[in-house]
Image: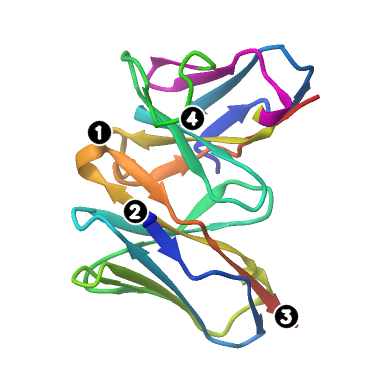
Amino acid sequence: GAVVSQHPSWVICKSGTSVKIECRSLDFQATTMFWYRQFPKQSLMLMATSNEGSKATYEQGVEKDKFLINHASLTLSTLTVTSAHPEDSSFYICSARGKRSSGRAPDTQYFGPGTRLTVL
Amino acid sequence: RKEVEQDPGPFNVPEGATVAFNCTYSNSASQSFFWYRQDCRKEPKLLMSVYSSGNEDGRFTAQLNRASQYISLLIRDSKLSDSATYLCVVLETSYDKVIFGPGTSLSVIP
């Protein structure tokens, strides 16, 4: 079964609104969570890496004030797209890497099902 | 040069064919390697890890050549259900960074 969930699975919003996406590890503690964005016919592009209890590390070219990441616990990370615009429309995918004590292989990433964001 | 490069696709093969995907990576310090498959509009799913000694899982064989910084995936006896995009993934442990290749699309035709 799924080990990482995302909510919502899809969202349509008006330009200028903010959208929050949740990523949860369901049966293990995730020390690190990753947020990716994937445009049509392209590969996944890493946006940021977040460790529980610390600030996220953003990849070059990703605006940290626009894509707010909060990793409040070992099972939950959130990505908020602030003041979304049509160019932010994309498939957002999170992944989680487990703690060694969790029984999940630490080098393996477990992906959420993704959130499809459409900004009108 | 891109950090991870893959064969440009798409690959269109008949059922039962053998198909090979190639991947090269630029950082010699890369530690771990994986092949993922991604179905249309879905999240990537781990297909297999890639070990230096080479590894096989049923119809799938993965190989790693560290000296050449090259990874391969061989699929034997292709099935229609193998149609997907195959992503080469490299983990740079020192930076805790995972890098995806651009993916190679495979269509298995009846």
Vertical position of residue A119 compared to residue B60: above or below: above
Which quadrant does the C terminus of chain B fall into?
bottom right
Front residue of A18/A111: it is A18
Q: Which residue is mark 4?
A: A26
Q: Residue at x 68, y 54 (%)?
A: B40
Residue B90: assigned label? 2
Q: Is residue B20 magenta?
A: no
What is the x, y in percent for residue B41? 68, 48
User: How many numbered tags mark residues here?
Assistant: 4
Chain letter of the residue beneath label 3 in the structure image: B
Q: Specify the segment rendered in magenta.
A: A68-87
Q: Which residue is mark 1?
A: A101
Q: Which residue is mark 3?
A: B109
Q: Amino acid at mark 2?
A: Val
Cα–Cα span, label 3 and label 1: 44 Å
The answer to whether marks 3 and 1 mark residues whose Cβ atoms lie closer than 8 Å is no
Frontmost of labels 4 and 2 is 2
Frontmost of labels 1 and 2 is 2
Question: Going by the image, does A44 lie left or right of B81?
Answer: left
Frontmost of labels 3 and 4 is 3
Chain letter of the residue beneath label 4 in the structure image: A
| Both marks 4 and 1 on one chain | yes
Q: Amino acid at mark 1?
A: Ser
Q: Residue at x 61, y 37 (%)?
A: A114
Cα–Cα span, label 4 and label 1: 15 Å
| Both marks 4 and 2 on one chain | no
